[in-house]
Image (cartoon, coloured by chain):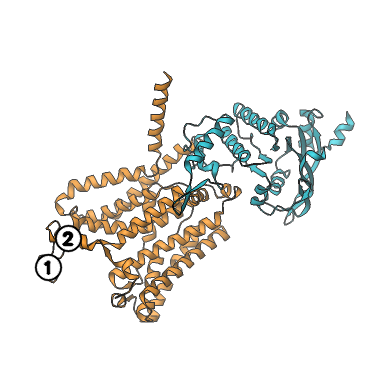
Chain colours: A cyan, B orange
Amino acid sequence: MSDASIMKLKDIHKSFGNVDALKGVSISINKGECHCLLGDNGAGKSTFIKIMSGVHQPTTGQISINGKDTVINNPRDAIDSGIATVYQDLALIPLMSVSRNFWLGRELTKKVGPITVMDFEKCNSILMSEMDKIGIQLRDPNQSIGTLSGGERQTVAIARAVFFGAKILILDEPTSALGVYQTSNVLKTIEKVREKGVAVVFISHNVSHALAVGDKFTVLSRGETLGTALSGEINFEELQSMMSGHKELSELKNKK
Amino acid sequence: MPSSLINMSSIRSKFSNALLRPDLGAIVGVILVFLFFFLVARDTGMFSLEGSMNWGIVSSQFIIIAVGACLLMIAGEFDLSVGSMIGFAGIVIAVTSVVWGWPVWLSIIAAFVISMTIGSLIGYITVKTNLPSFIVSLAFLYILRGMTIFIAIVSTKKTIIGGVTEAAQNDWLAPIFGGKIFTGVFEWLAEHGLIETFIAGTKAGQPVVSGIPMMMVWALGLIIFAHFLLTKTRFGNWIYASGGDAQAARHIGVPVNRVKILMFVFTAFCATVFATTQVIEFGSASADRGILKEFEAIISVVIGGALLTGGYGSVIGAALGAVIFGVVQQGLFFIGVESSLFRVFLGVLLLLAVILNTHIRKLITGPK
């Protein structure tokens, strides 16, 4: 078990002034596994993923990546350690083209004389083939992200993260704003990504979406972990009642 | 069947892409404006070499500040201190060169260094306080204008400082801002009777238009530089991203604050170019120069198709917006229309441009 673990967060606390957003959250993330982090609004999911992705630093607690204790100071650090985050509404910039979005921050360049310019030809051709692989039909790499559907945007963002070598992919409510058809497309994409050996952390408050792709489920409530269950060990009603009623996982198991 | 289908859809997509160019409105606007004045002002000399030089110079002035405002607006910020910066930089050059006796090249460099430092300060305050740049730069509109008048009064008891022309004689840097190029070509054209010459007076026989003013060269140079930077380099990609969605850009690792501060510095640079060309041309600096220029720059940029909310726009569009500005202002003069109507026209144009841009934005970002 421990061999597959690529990221461990132990006893993470985070306070903002007087407010304790996280009160000791622990989670272990394995390679090629979709780990669902469930919780109601305000449970601390957002704070927790911001710590994983370097936006916030924990007040106390330990983070280890590949068995080594690590401090993630900023988003750049997280990206360098292979942690990529796709935020629900902050993933892409709608006014910019798909190609400019895909390569943002990691633009391919070439030299024209002494001047370094973006290599649009290469950017666009790689983009088109990556989009093809993930099942998005683009008519033009220069069309703006705004012309894509919500599900397609999520898929582009996921494809981008994986293309740039994400080992751990954090998805923040990727399906919460989507319709049924688009949701199923995004869930299929998650499955494809997991098959490549990428660890997926899927944040959601939608239990049925989580059950559709999840291998493991951790429920957060009021800044604490209520427990972790494997797929097949737990059903929809149990997860749902844990999220809403703050029942401990062990309690539920004892009842069985 | 499929091939014709693909052709049709690709033609349609090319067509809609053309429609979604940010500068489309400005291109149409320029054509309409030229068409209008060509029809009504053909006989006034507006399109003679001399007349063209007239609106060409005015347009170039607008272009120089519009280019800076354009990149800054695409990066998601405003600078309302541009006009005051123009007055300030001019007075710095005049006071240091005329009153303190510095060589003019040193005065010009000093003006650039000071202005760009203030520009970076405006940017730094904006990104650090998270306040709207509208307010931060409004404060500097007053601070700089006040400082400008204060420095002028304290050092010369006047608000207009002359004598720069004398000080700039034999200076190596001044001609780069106030000189003309291709004067030989124009002399040659005059000698061969191809362009108009003065008939009488001390300049008799010399061409009426003696060369291309450096102001036009700066305008062209800044357009090329800014357009290239924005559309071809990775830094340009970061400018779009910083204005399009600063938070998303930060998450992906774009140094948004650095980008924004640098764009404030660039705006200050453009304002100083404007100030320097004027000071060298007129031979004097005046503490009230540049008033309302910040708004003229912003209007040019908006006519050029940029969104006030950032992330979208075009340098070419802003330059064309500036040309519309210059041609209409001078054109009304040529056809003898009361010049106050220019402002009415400008207001109407601004309103139309903003409505059009908002509509285009809806087309780009889709129904959502």
Q: Residue furthest top?
A: B1
Name above or below for residue A229 compared with residue B285. Answer: above
Work out whether mark 2 precedes mark 1 in sequence or the reverse, and give the earlier one.
Answer: 2
Same chain, labels 2 and 1: yes
Q: Is residue A3 left or right of residue B231?
A: right
**Of marks 2 and 1, the one in the foreground:** 2
The x and y percentages for residue B123 are: 51, 61
- Label 1 Cα neighbours within 10 Å, binned few <14 / some 14-19 / many ≥20: few
Q: Are marks 2 and 1 in contact (CB under 8 Å)?
A: no
Assign the N terminus of chain B to one quadrant of the image.
top left
| Picture quadrant where residue A73 is located | bottom right
> What subunit carries mark 1?
B
* Residue named by callout 1: B204
The x and y percentages for residue B299 are: 37, 53
Q: Residue at x 17, y 60 (%)?
A: B188
Name above or below for residue A88 compared with residue B81. Answer: above
Separation of residues labelled 2 and 1 (CA atoms): 15 Å
| Picture quadrant where residue A229 is located | top right
Q: Determine whether the residue tagged by mark 1 lies in a helix, strand or loop.
A: loop
Nearest to the observer: residue A194 or residue B19: A194
Q: Which mark is residue B123?
A: none
> What subunit carries mark 2?
B
Q: Determine whether the residue tagged by mark 2 lies in a helix, strand or loop.
A: helix
Q: Residue at x 41, y 27 (%)?
A: B9
Nearest to the observer: residue B57 or residue A114: A114
Q: Residue furthest front?
A: A113
* Residue named by callout 2: B188
Name above or below for residue B31 compared with residue B57. Answer: above
The x and y percentages for residue A249 are: 84, 36
Q: Is residue A243 left or right of residue B313?
A: right
